[in-house]
Amino acid sequence: MVNTAVDPVAAADVANMAAPAAHDMSFVGMFWHADPVVQFIMGMLLLASFWAWAIIFDKWLTFRSIKTKAAKFENDFWASEALDKFHERIKKRANHPMAIIFVAAMEEWFRSKIRDLSAANLSQKLGMRERINQIMMVARNREVEKLESGLGFLASIGSSAPFIGLFGTVLGIMHSFSSIALSKNTSLVSVAPGIAEALFATAIGLFAAIPAVIAYNKFSNDLDKFAGKLEDFSVEFNMLLSRQIEG
């Protein structure tokens, strides 16, 4: 009589050999199981994303602060009775662009008045007006340039991060297909983890790019509006000073 009993230990070994290796499909697990080159790309994208978020929070606080301070400054400016007294009160705490433009123009006006104290002809008055206008323009451009800092990085991340992530995905899929060819196992269970790890690079690229693009568009729009507001104030203040000079 033939013994048909199956050894339980041998059956368990066969089952374990046939069962596919378990893969950690969490974000951390996919990162650590990815190809080293893909890991490096994902690490760069994560660092870029953290830096982009730091710029986003900094710009958000900056624009909110200067809008509030500019609104208060304009109210105080137009409510003041004398420019020189208002200048004395504001010059030591000029910590936003509109106040800095005002202080720069007033200091140039005072210097020009002392230098051209005996000047009464029209050409010298026009020269004073031109100098004050140039000083305000230079101060405005410097302040706008400060506000623009960081926006270029957001634009670069928004435009390049998806392509960098896609590059990591291509490399990851190539590595996954090479492993499949060597193992000669084309089952979906063995193919899916490697492809998922590769696609994770594209996901990180989009995670870095989408907030950067949205923030760049918003802050660029806010900057354009605020730069226009600074220009309007400069023109109005220049006209006010012109009346003072000609008077």
Image (cartoon, rainbow, N blue to C red):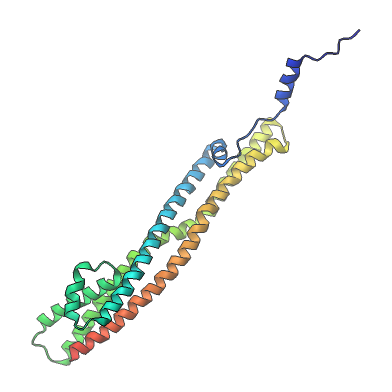
Residue 40 spot, x, y in % from top left: 49, 42
| Residue drawn at point x = 50 percent, y = 58 percent | 211
Residue pictured at 14% horizontal, 92% vertical: 121
Q: Residue furthest left?
A: 118
Q: In the figure, residue 65 lies in which quadrant?
A: bottom left
Residue 237, x across and y down, in percent: 27, 82
- At x 73%, y 24%, the residue is 15
Nearest to the observer: residue 225 or residue 182? 225
- Spot the residue most to the right: 1
**Residue 221 position in % (x across, y down):** 44, 70
Looking at the image, is 53 positioned above or below residue 105?
above
Quadrant location of the N terminus in the rendered image: top right
Q: Which residue appears at 64% of the width and 32% of the height?
A: 22
Judge left or right: residue 240 versus residue 43.
Answer: left
Picture quarter containing residue 56? bottom left
Q: Residue furthest top?
A: 1
Q: Position of residue 179 (x, y in %)?
A: 64, 34
Residue 50 shown left or right of residue 176 in the figure: left
- Nearer to us in this view, 155 or 106: 106
Residue 18 sits in which quadrant?
top right
The number of numbered badges drawn on the structure is 0
Quadrant (top left, top right, bottom left, bottom right) of the C terminus: bottom left
